[in-house]
Amino acid sequence: MPHGTTEAKKWAEEIGLLVFECATSIGRELTAYVGGAQRVHDLERWAAEWDGSSLLARERLQAACHIIALLKPALAREQMAAWFRDPRPELGDISPATALHLSTTTAIRPRLNQLALRHASAGRAPAVA
């Protein structure tokens, strides 16, 4: 995608928003890892370059943002990062962050969504009548 085009600007804006949402909730280093980056610097590269790795990063970050939205009512920021980092028996003792980092989102997203929903519903305080 040529720089300066409408598509390039739209791409950069979309990636920027995904990175911002994830980084605000789980930190920049974990956001980079979840997206499949080798280093935090790749977060900016994804916005500037439209290639196979940035397309997969976008899918992973979209999945992470969805999971964050599911968990936000039940978890504080520190707890959110821990939820992504801590190994889960339901995932074969790997963390949700590693599951996203290593796999395609099509394969893992439904399992992570289910896990996040269970965690969020268990973590919510009962409603007061």
Image (cartoon, grey):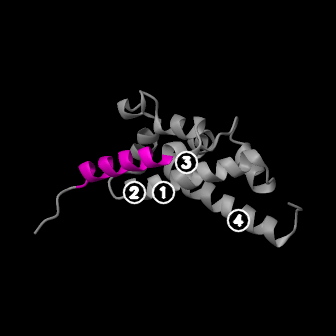
* Secondary element at image label 4: helix
The residue that label 2 is drawn on is 70
Circles 1 and 2, Cβ within 8 Å, touching? The answer is yes
What is the three-letter code of the residue carrying label 3? Thr
Task: Say which mark, if any, is on residue 54.
Answer: none
| Spatial separation of the CA atoms under disc 1 and disc 2 | 6 Å
* Residue 111 on the magenta segment: yes
Predominant secondary structure, magenta span = helix
The residue that label 4 is drawn on is 13
Q: Which residues are magenta?
A: 109-124
| Spatial separation of the CA atoms under disc 3 and disc 2 | 18 Å
Tell me if residue 127 comes above or below residue 27 in the rendering.
below
Q: How many marks?
A: 4
Q: Position of residue 117 (x, y in %)?
A: 34, 52
Which residue is at a point 53% across and 43% down the rendered structure image?
107
Task: Say which mark, if any, is on residue 106.
Answer: 3
What is the three-letter code of the residue carrying label 1? His
First reached walking from the N terminus: tag 3 or tag 4: 4
| Spatial separation of the CA atoms under disc 1 and disc 3 | 13 Å
Circles 3 and 4, Cβ within 8 Å, touching? The answer is no
State left or right for residue 41 relative to residue 86.
Answer: right
* Residue 91 on the magenta segment: no
State left or right for residue 87 relative to residue 59.
Answer: left
What is the three-letter code of the residue carrying label 4? Glu
Q: Residues within 10 Å of mark 1 (few under 14, many from 20)?
A: some
- In the displayed orientation, state which residue is furthest to the top: 93
Task: Say which mark, if any, is on residue 66.
Answer: 1
First reached walking from the N terminus: tag 2 or tag 4: 4
- In the displayed orientation, state which residue is furthest to the bottom: 6
Q: Residues within 10 Å of mark 2 (few under 14, many from 20)?
A: some
First reached walking from the N terminus: tag 4 or tag 1: 4
